[in-house]
Image (cartoon, rainbow, N blue to C red):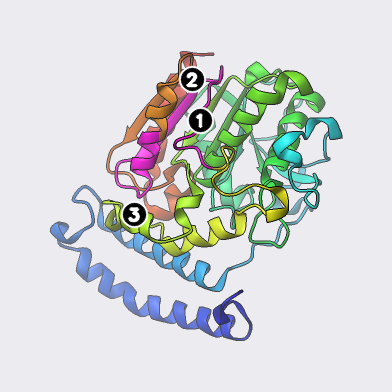
């Protein structure tokens, strides 16, 4: 049942109080972090310390009030870069994608960067990027994923990025497999409508989006040949949230040695995990191999790149994921540890003061992509 903080007018009052309290804390944070030895990491700048603290407080409060992110299929500021993708043929949604009879494929919005390809089937490498946000916030539009898209294009051989606006589980009736259905729709749109060869498409995702990208990779590996969708060139995983089920309680989060050097909160992860959890009618749980990937590695012809921050709470899960997938015969997996970086700089770099670290991470991934393309 929703807590009292999620109901109006309490929700609005709490939000105003939270803003006022954090404004009052701001000068205190500045004074506290001036001495480098008091900073969460000695390599962080004063700006990074302050911005990490601001985002951490925002996510904590967003989870408490269960902030809603309304999704619209209208173009809005994206204008001609916006695309509404209609559901693909019903035959493309099989097995796990059809596990919940009450969750069906629907229209999916998406943003092209820097613009929609002018000649169908003729762009270079296209990155299909799924935004992060614990499945509860984000929309892939310019204000949300614009930095990630621009950074990926600038530091790789990709000519375009397409960022789908998949359904969020914070909105009623959109738990698993809603996001996976939308990912399948987006991929089918690129291949079948835009005529882009699968071997010119790179799947990519940050945090929860990386969980979704890996889920789609598994789906295409296991079902692609039977539904007429070839596997992509590669999959890029940025700070992947590999085991949402571990976030249902706070124990796993608080046991991480990196709790003090990251901005993600246990409450935010718990909110995302509880809302994303499949309905009992599907017969699935958060431990399903399409959601929980540590301990469930699978064999795939798709090369996988894992980028994780040295300071992030998910660091040890991400390393374990890479090691487990590497151990599967035939898999090609690259693990890159980003020095003194926090969670998901590819998405939130500007909000955190980690723009340079995000660019470095993208540059390393771009170099790796050239070895397989």
Q: Earlier in the sequence, mark 2 or mark 1?
A: 1
**What residue lies at 30% left-to-right and 52% top-to-bottom?**
256
Residue 145 higher or lower than 137, as above or below: above
* Image quarter of residue 10: bottom right
Q: Find disc 1 in the rendering and name its residue.
A: 236
Disc 2: CA contacts within 10 A as few (<14), some (14-19) or many (>=20): many
Q: Is residue 265 visible?
A: yes
* Image quarter of residue 182: top right
Percent x, y for residue 136?
59, 57
Distance from disc 2 to disc 1, alpha carbons, whole Å, reads 9 Å
Quadrant of the rendering where the C terminus is positioned: top right
Residue 366 higher or lower than 246, as above or below: above
Residue 290 higher or lower than 249, as above or below: above
Q: Find disc 2 in the rendering and name its residue.
A: 369
Q: Identify the magenta region.
A: 292-320
Percent x, y for residue 213?
58, 35
**What residue lies at 65% left-to-right and 56% top-to-bottom?**
169
Confirm or deny contact between disc 2 and disc 1 (CB under 8 A): yes
Distance from disc 2 to disc 3, alpha carbons, whole Å, reads 28 Å
Q: Nearer the viewer, residue 130 or 252?
A: 252
Q: Secondary structure at mark 2?
A: helix
Q: Earlier in the sequence, mark 2 or mark 3?
A: 3
């Amino acid at each position: 049942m929703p807590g009292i903080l999620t109901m109006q007018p309490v929700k609005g009052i709490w939000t105003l109080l939270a803003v006022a309290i954090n404004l009052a804390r701001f000068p205190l944070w500045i004074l506290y972090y001036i001495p480098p030895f008091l900073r969460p990491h000695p390599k962080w700048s004063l700006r990074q310390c302050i911005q990490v603290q601001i985002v951490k407080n925002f996510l904590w409060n967003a989870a408490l009030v269960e902030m809603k992110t309304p999704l619209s299929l209208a173009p809005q500021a994206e204008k001609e870069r916006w695309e509404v993708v209609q559901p693909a043929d019903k035959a493309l949604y099989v097995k796990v994608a059809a596990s919940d009879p009450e969750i069906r494929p629907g229209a999916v919005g998406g943003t092209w960067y820097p613009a929609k390809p002018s000649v169908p089937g003729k762009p270079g490498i296209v990155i299909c990027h799924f935004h992060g946000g614990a499945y509860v916030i984000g929309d892939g539009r310019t204000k949300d994923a614009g930095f990630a898209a621009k950074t990926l294009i600038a530091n790789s051989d990709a000519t375009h990025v397409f960022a789908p606006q998949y359904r969020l589980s914070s909105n009623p009736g959109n738990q698993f497999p809603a996001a996976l259905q939308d990912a399948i729709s987006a991929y089918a749109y690129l291949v079948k409508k835009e005529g882009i060869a699968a071997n010119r498409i790179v799947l990519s995702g940050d945090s929860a989006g990386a969980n979704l990208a890996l889920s789609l990779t598994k789906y295409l590996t296991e079902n692609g040949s039977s539904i007429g969708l070839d596997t992509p060139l590669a999959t890029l995983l940025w700070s992947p949230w590999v085991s949402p089920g571990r976030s249902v309680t706070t124990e796993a989060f608080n046991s991480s040695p990196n709790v003090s050097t990251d901005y993600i909160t246990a409450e935010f992860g718990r909110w995302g995990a509880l809302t994303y959890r499949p309905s009992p009618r599907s017969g699935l749980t958060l431990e399903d191999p399409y959601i929980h990937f540590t301990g469930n590695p699978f064999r795939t012809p798709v090369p996988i790149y894992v980028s994780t921050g040295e300071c992030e709470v998910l660091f040890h899960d991400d390393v374990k994921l890479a090691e487990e997938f590497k151990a599967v015969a035939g898999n090609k997996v690259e693990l890159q540890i980003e020095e003194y970086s926090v969670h998901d700089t590819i998405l939130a770099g500007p909000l955190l003061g980690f723009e340079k670290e995000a660019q470095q991470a993208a540059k390393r991934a771009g170099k790796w992509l050239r070895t397989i393309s």
